[in-house]
């Protein structure tokens, strides 16, 4: 750790365009916390291979995610922003964790159980996802990992794996803790379910005002109430209850007016970030990722040297 600061680590899969759920549940936390923690933020490109097996698409998504981080205010002079695939120690450590992990333990993972319940053929990458994520976290001795509610189990897996490795080979890894902001733990999408690209119910983070308006106007509402629950839940991410109360009281039952107010408030928040995003070049983010990789590699290689010594492969 740097001085008295604890270490923060998290990342986002480059599996598609980011939406406001990604921003409020995770990315915004990185920005808000970066002054208080020694921060390591990565683009989880190897994780994305479970979903994207098209080189051009994945490359474009990696660039997009890196630009998003910079555009929302991540200070890359103080925060280490890097690409997972640039640090080979991630996959090396994941294999070592595989050797001390049982199949029944991994069968309890939400992603595996969900895929199995839907009758999908489960790839090894999906099944083994928690061990690569454990390696992502434990390589950097992260103290906290900002995640959404649905990712809490992965931090628990990392902690379990650290405890098991420490017990077998000696004290090596810091036990991480998840950091979840309850009010943004699950953000509703336009259909009322959790906002997710897979459901097609998202509001684009850097969409045009027209695109944002189209998404907001499609939010399902409950005609039985004066206040549309899903509209309010998203609006609450932008303003306090005290700020929203007079608006929702004045416009009770006027769903179109309330949606239009949400559009304006989203545009006010998003427009400056969108403008910055559009000025960032591909070459700029490639340099940022390269510089970040050098800093991350120094930490990861030192940790792996210790791990190799502990497990007995260093002669």
Image: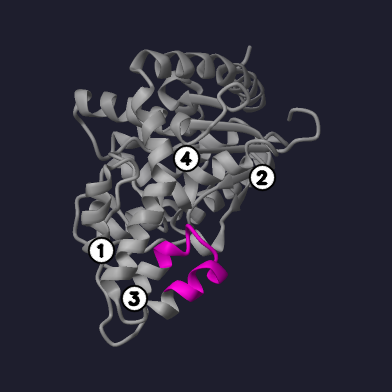
- Identify the residue shown where x is 73% and y is 30%: 1
Q: Badge 4 is on which residue?
A: 133
Query: Which of labels 3 and 1 is toward the front?
Result: 3
Residue 216 screen position, x and y as percent: 27, 60
Residues shaded magenta? 233-247
Q: Residues within 10 Å of mark 1 (few under 14, many from 20)?
A: few
Q: Badge 2 is on which residue?
A: 175
Labels 2 and 4: the sequence-earlier one? 4
The answer to whether residue 137 is left or right of residue 104 is: right
Labels 4 and 3: the sequence-earlier one? 4
Label 3, label 1: how many angstroms apart (C-alpha)? 32 Å
Q: Secondary structure at mark 2?
A: loop
**Residue most toward the front?**
250
Labels 1 and 4: the sequence-earlier one? 1
201, 13: nearer the viewer = 201
The disc placed on residue 248 is: none
Q: Residues within 10 Å of mark 4 (few under 14, many from 20)?
A: many
Label 1, label 2: how many angstroms apart (C-alpha)? 31 Å
Residue 76 screen position, x and y as percent: 55, 24
Label 2, label 4: how many angstroms apart (C-alpha)? 14 Å
Residue 200 shows up from this direction: no
Q: Badge 1 is on which residue?
A: 117
Asked if disc 1 and disc 4 are in contact, CB closer than 8 Å, the reply is no
Label 1, label 4: how many angstroms apart (C-alpha)? 22 Å
């Amino acid at each position: 750790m740097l001085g008295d600061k604890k270490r923060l680590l998290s990342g986002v899969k480059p599996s598609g365009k980011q939406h406001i759920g990604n921003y409020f549940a995770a990315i915004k936390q990185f920005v808000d916390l970066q002054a208080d923690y020694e921060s390591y933020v990565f683009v989880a490109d190897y994780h994305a291979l479970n979903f994207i097996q098209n080189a051009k698409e994945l490359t474009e998504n990696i660039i997009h995610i890196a630009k998003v981080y910079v555009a929302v205010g991540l200070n890359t002079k103080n925060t280490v922003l890097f690409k997972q695939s640039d640090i080979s120690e991630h996959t090396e450590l994941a294999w070592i964790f595989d050797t001390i992990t049982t199949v029944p333990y991994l069968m309890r993972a939400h992603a595996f159980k969900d895929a199995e319940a839907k009758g999908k053929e489960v790839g090894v990458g999906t099944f083994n996802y928690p061990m690569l994520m454990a390696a992502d976290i434990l390589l950097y001795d992260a103290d906290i990992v900002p995640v959404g509610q649905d990712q809490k189990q992965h931090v628990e897996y990392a902690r379990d794996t650290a405890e098991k490795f420490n017990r077998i080979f000696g004290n090596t890894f810091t036990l991480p803790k998840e950091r979840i902001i309850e009010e943004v733990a699950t953000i509703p999408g336009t259909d009322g379910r959790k906002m997710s690209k897979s459901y097609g119910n998202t509001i684009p983070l850097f969409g045009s005002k027209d695109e944002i308006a189209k998404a907001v106007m499609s939010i399902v509402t409950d005609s039985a109430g004066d206040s549309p629950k899903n509209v309010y839940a998203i609006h609450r991410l932008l303003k306090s209850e005290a700020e929203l109360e007079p608006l929702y009281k004045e416009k009770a039952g006027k769903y179109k007016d309330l949606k239009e107010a949400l559009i304006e408030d989203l545009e006010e928040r998003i427009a400056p970030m969108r403008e910055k995003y559009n000025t960032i070049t591909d070459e700029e983010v490639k340099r940022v990722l390269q510089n970040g990789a050098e800093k991350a590699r120094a930490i990861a290689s030192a940790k792996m040297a210790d791990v190799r010594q502990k497990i007995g492969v260093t002669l």
